[in-house]
Amino acid sequence: MNRFFKRKWLLHCYFWIGYSFYFFAVNALGNSRLNLGASLITVFYCAVIFYAVYLILIYIFDQGHILGTVLLMSGFYLISALIVYYELYGRFGLEIINNRYVITKHAFSWAKYIQTFLVMHSNYTVMAVGYYYYKSKLRESDDKLEAVNARLAAESTMKSFQYTTLSAQVHPHMMANIFSNLKNKVDPYDVELGMQLSEIYRLMKFYMEAHHVEGATHILLADEVKALEQYLSIQEKVESNPFYINLSCSGNLMRFSIAPTLLQTLAGNLFKHADLWDKDHPAKIDILVGNAGYRITIQNKKRSGPQMMPSHDVGLRNIRIRMEYLFGADFSMEEHQDANHYELMLSVQRYR
């Protein structure tokens, strides 16, 4: 960036140096007493006019401050008018200009003064406005090109994710078909087992839809609770020993949404790390829905002894990222624990 900035202003310097020689060559044709020094000083001041007007347009007019632009332009032209007067007619005017370029006599003349002022300021003001307009259009084109490139990159990434997701779903889809066929074959002989296979099929379909790239980013809290109940029902048949998880819901679950599979992730953590076989201290999943949002509280007794499955906090980190993506500052997550107990609270409050 610094290298580009230096190169940009170096090109500006080359332009004004070249313009100085052009200015001298053109004006020397009508004034044989004009020298290169006078041309350099004149062009330098013209460059001051150019950059003053251009910077006012960039930093003031671009921000929509019309009145500020008018006041600054007027102030600059007033100061510049005084500088031009004292330069050409004042006591301390440079000898290199007086009697050599613009003026042939020291007597003040409004006509010559106004002519000199307008020639110096109007030309370079128009140049500054033209350059500002050119740069604005160039920035606008660059912004449009950047937006198009960003959209193309996003579409390319989306297609890549979609392909990966669809590829990953080949196996679950095949398994879902297998469970459906098994259910049809088992139903006539074992109704309970057939119902269990049906629950597994519905839960697997739920997971497939939840992880589809073009699927919903969040679902109703009621649908997520229903999927959690299916998950727990299946686990009752899978686990060799009875476990104790109390799920309680209060309020209207149809009012708010949640990231899909979030409750199943939390329940999965319970099976990994909690002591679920103590009937007197069951794990609790409490969902409380209010007027402005909802709160999910997980409480459990820790499993004693060495952990069979170490915790990597991947599940909780993913939950936080997904919920913050959906709800932003409206979402909060807190953990509290001691040697024997663990508590996790997730809260979504939409109207704080």
Image (spheres, rainbow, N blue to C red):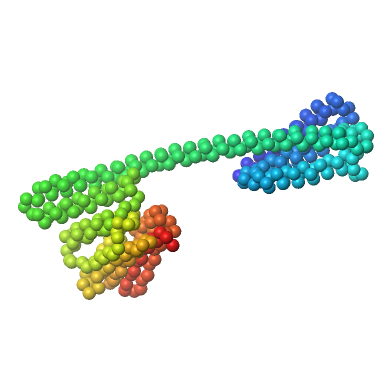
Residue 303 lies in what quarter of the image?
bottom left
Image quadrant occupied by the N terminus: top right
Residue 273 lies in what quarter of the image?
bottom left
Q: Is residue 303 left or right of residue 129?
A: left
Q: Is residue 166 left or right of residue 320?
A: left
How far across and how far down the image is residue 253, in percent?
A: 29, 59
Q: Foreground residue, 164 or 257?
A: 257
Q: Residue at x 37, y 40 (%)?
A: 159
How far across and how far down the image is residue 174, in percent?
A: 21, 44
Q: State whether residue 326 is above or below residue 346.
A: above
Q: Residue at x 27, y 58 (%)?
A: 225
Residue 327 lies in what quarter of the image?
bottom left
Is any atom of residue 184 visible in this view? yes
Q: Residue at x 79, y 44 (%)?
A: 78
How far across and how far down the image is residue 270, in percent?
A: 28, 64
Image quadrant occupied by the C terminus: bottom left
Q: State whether residue 113 is above or below residue 339.
A: above
Is any atom of residue 305 visible in this view? no
Residue extending furthest top? 29
